Image: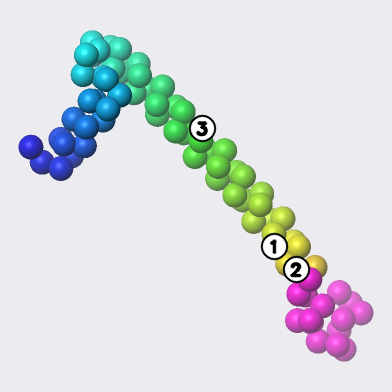
């Protein structure tokens, strides 16, 4: 039994999938994949929004110090 087979076996035993029929196991795995997709998709959207807000906050704080004094009036 190689590493991948052991992980699949552990997954089946942990969630009790070994006692289900093939179609019930397929349905459960489909629901898990859809749930994981929603979590990762919405998580990535949240992280991008937070990073945009954070970069906007940092730019308002640090940009006046980074722009030379002679062109600060253009900013």
Quarter occupied by residue 19: top left
Magenta-colored span? 61-75
Earlier sequence position, callout 3 versus callout 1:
3
Q: Provide the residue designation for mark 3.
A: 38
Residues at marks 3 and 2, CA–CA distance in whole angstroms: 31 Å
Question: Which mark, by number, is residue 55?
Answer: 1
**10 Å neighbourhood of mark 3: few (<14), some, or many (≥20)?**
few
| Residue 21 % position (x, y) | 23, 10
Q: Are marks 1 and 2 in contact (CB under 8 Å)?
A: yes
Q: Say whether residue 43 is left or right of residue 1.
A: right
When the figure is inspected, residue 38 is found, relative to residue 69, above or below; the finding is above
Q: Say whether residue 34 is left or right of residue 64.
A: left
Q: Provide the residue designation for mark 2.
A: 59
Earlier sequence position, callout 3 versus callout 2:
3
**10 Å neighbourhood of mark 2: few (<14), some, or many (≥20)?**
few
**Identity of the residue drawn at 76% across and 75% down:** 62
Quarter occupied by residue 63: bottom right
């Amino acid at each position: 039994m190689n590493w991948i087979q052991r992980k699949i076996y552990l997954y089946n035993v942990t969630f009790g999938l070994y006692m289900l029929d093939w179609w019930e196991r397929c349905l459960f795995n489909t629901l898990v994949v859809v749930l994981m997709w929603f979590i990762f998709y919405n998580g990535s959207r949240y992280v991008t929004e937070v990073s945009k807000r954070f970069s906007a906050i940092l730019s308002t704080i640090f940009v006046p110090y980074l722009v030379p004094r002679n062109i600060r009036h253009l900013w």
